[in-house]
Image (cartoon, rainbow, N blue to C red):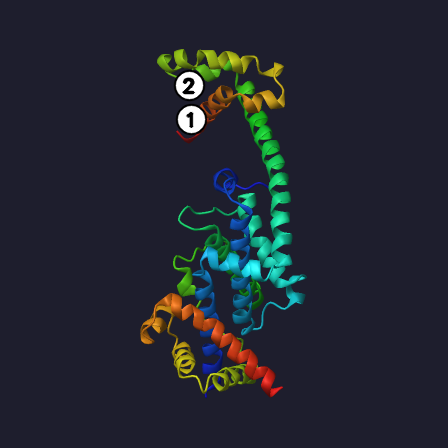
Amino acid sequence: MATVNARQALSNLYGLMMEINLHRTDEDVLKELQEHPDPQIEKHVLRIKQLTTKLKAEATKVRFQDAVNQLMILKQKGVDEIKKLFQPSEQKELIPLFRKFEELTEKDEKEILEDQELLRLMKILKDKLDDCKND
Amino acid sequence: MEVGEHYNSNHQRIASLTDNDWRVALNKCKKHIQWRLRQRTLYGAHSPSNLGADPVEHYLGVAYEKILSGEWEWKKEHSLSEQMIRIAHKYIGLEVEKISTDKKTSLQIVYKDIEEDFYHMANAPPDIDESEYEEKLRIIEAAVFEDSQLAIMVEAIKEGHKRSEIAALMDIQPRQFDKLKEKLERKVKNYKSSTQ
């Protein structure tokens, strides 16, 4: 047999094994794990839980930092200047939210992130400012 | 670890996963990595010294970390197992490319048909020793010599046929064909121990 064929044949075999593995059902896999418990898998299940908790804390931190950064940009621009970006009809709808925006310094991290209306306003403002930059 | 752009959408699905969902995905991904590494070792990559860690452990960690962090999108059309396999498969390929080209490669390439890619042959380095592979193939052929069903299977594999094609050739369902894999592994294992 030609040498290239041996390597190609083995490569085909390993490819086939990958394809068969991909098609295994959940029931077959769980049955196998019941019959032959795998400590490596259990170790990773535990690590996934730890990592999920850690990343959740990190995501909250990032979300707060993004909100604060966005607020800084908006504050620098000034509320009156921002209002000019909107049509009078839009302004009417958003006036209650603008008041919240002006009171922001009183709020702490938890309150900001739990205030869905405020986050909605910040998203609207950010989109509006991005649109202005792109025009 | 940093939070990536797909964190929120990935975690909407992750929140509903059970431990058993993770166990299934980890097990299938682990098996895939083992076969993929064997395939890639045909081209001289993936010794533990290349990675500084056990390769299976390394790529298994990469597969779920990318989903948990949101660096990779968990596509809605893929199961958790399939998404993890796609990630591990991709990173193993990148490691080979890094070794063979010594260049950083883009992570943007997506295999549309991953099953097709299982059979993809990379270019072999010119100085590779082929005798080891000839010996491995010889052992497989000798192990199935007296089993006509497995002999047909091995011949079809050598010709490059895929799972559904071989099942059709043998006139059996793909799920029945999958059971032959265990028989083949058992035969090769028994043959090896009988000749040692």
**Residue at point 37%, 12% (across, down):** A88
Picture quadrant of residue B161 = bottom left
Name the spot of residue A107 as percent of width and height, x first. 61, 17
| Front-most of residues B127 and B144 | B144
In this image, B30 relative to A27: left or right? right
**Residue at point 64%, 57% (across, down):** A39
Marks 2 & 1, CB-CB < 8 Å contact: yes
**Residue at point 53%, 45% (across, down):** B18
Which residue carries the number 1 mark?
A132
Amino acid, disc 2: Leu
Report whether mark 2 lies on the same chain as mark 1: yes
**Residue B122 higher or lower than B149, as above or below:** above
Q: Between marks 2 and 1, how big is the CA–CA gap?
A: 8 Å
Which circle marks residue B19 in the picture?
none
Amino acid, disc 1: Cys
Task: Provide the chain ID for the residue under circle 1.
Answer: A
Task: Provide the chain ID for the residue under circle 2.
Answer: A
Q: Residues within 10 Å of mark 2 (few under 14, many from 20)?
A: some
Which residue carries the number 2 mark?
A85
Name the spot of residue B15 as percent of width and height, x first. 52, 39
Q: Quadrant of the C terminus of chain B?
A: bottom right
